Image (cartoon, grey):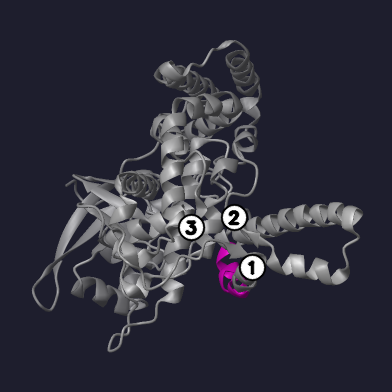
Amino acid sequence: MSAKSDDLDFNPFYKQLQLTFRNKFLEAQKKCWIICVPQKSSVKNDIKVTKHFIDTHILKPSPFFKSHFVSTDKEESILVELEGETMHTEQGSIKILSEEIGYNSEYKRFRILLIDKPLDPRYCKKNKSTVDFASQNNFISDCKKFLQSFPQHIEPMIKLDKELQQFINNYMILPEYLHNTSLKLQEIIKWGFQLFTSVHTPVLQDNEFLSIEINSAIENYVLEAVHHKLFPIIKQKCSLEDRLLSTKLQQLYSSNLSADQLGVKPEFCCQTPNALVELANLNAKNNPAQKLRCLKSTLEMLTEDVKNSVAPLPGFSDIPCLTSDDLIPILVTVLVQSRPQYLESNLYYIQNFSWQLSANSKLSYSLVTFQAAKEFIKSFEVLHLKPSSSRLKKEMSLEELMEVTVQLQKNYKKDKAESHKNSNAVSPIDRQLANITRMIEESTKEFRQQTENEAERKNAGLGDFLNNLQNTTLGFGYGKQA
């Protein structure tokens, strides 16, 4: 390790950890967690050292990956891989400037790492011209807006649009040659990246934070522009696999599959309405990054649904831990209930057209989890199902969907303060409310049309109308498919 560039005794973060947040400091020592201390010069001047700042810079071992660690905040929002003198995160790489070894009261070792910048990009000191783009929840939808936010990008933007139009008009995409299409799109993205970064003074280097943001924005902008041309060909390539998977999902659905039949612990067998609603949006996403974030948020909603339904076991104050061994079979039941179309196509699309995806990120873990659940479904034989003590509820009624909305609204105030930290952010609850509202509107609109048509033919009375409304249910094959 290189010599320390920032003495720990004078580092404000480390001082606050020892004084104001001493209990957390002692807990980290006792459990031999890693304490990460960002050098003073890398942190925004107006940032106060809060509990969230502390929690996101103390790391505990990941239960899923060797040599990986997660932050100790409630959401475990930061995943880190340690490799020599480098820490790899979703936002990029962070250098370890120095390391100190401490010993707790039981003479066990714990590590203190001095790092070149904060793990959470929101705390990083940046150039004034840099937009904190990567940390925003509306990252994908604002790609064009971000690229156009720099005056020097006007000309590169015109050239990129012309190149994309030429690709859309002239390039032939064939199912057997999707690899060539992938290489062609990567060439366009690389060319666009060089075009955009060259107009900055001084010219941006590949490892600079702004250049990483620009590269991500270009990739997602390009793939969104060609989605309508590319994704139908991917569906052609994966059509057989999609049909086979849909058939298997329907078989399991007709067999009233329940989580306990797959060996899920009784305390984790529950309804997962939020995960179902989130997954229903997969086909509406228009590029691999959006689709991957939909998978990630589905797993987050699934975990939240399970946690909300689980009471602590007798004699224990903590909620039982949900591991990947539990998560995959529970996800299988979600897939069976929702029976998503084109799942094979979507997973192929994400895997083969996401070039900035880190193999160690939470997004990558989400993709691997869905692939594991898909392979489980494909290889599972319905005849091997054990008898179930409870039956799978096939659909959510309109009333239940409204109940989900009410519950989300109850939780909204709790999360609102956090979401206001970033005025542009869209919280998962905001998104879920919007999704459910849209679903209810579509369902009631469709029902209203059916009722009006029926009334013209049969002069149906009010009693029949209310009875029909009560019996209307929403499955999860709704909405326009891609």
Kind of residue indicated by mark 1? Thr
Q: Residues at badges 3 and 2 in contact (C-beta under 8 Å)? A: no
Determine which residue is flagged by label 3.
45
Is most of the magenta stretch helix, strand or loop? Answer: helix
Q: Relative to the observer, which residue lies in front, 70 or 205?
A: 70
Residue visible at 52% across and 21% down in the picture: 192
Kind of residue indicated by mark 2? Ala
Can residue 278 be seen here? The reply is: yes
Residue 315 image point, x, y percent: 27, 89
Residue 479 image point, x, y percent: 65, 47
Residue visible at 58% across and 73% down in the picture: 411
Label ID, residue 405: 1
Which quadrant of the view contains residue 357? top left
Determine which residue is flagged by label 2.
425
Magenta residues?
Answer: 410-420
* Nearer the camera: disc 1 or disc 3: 1
Which quadrant of the view contains residue 70? bottom left
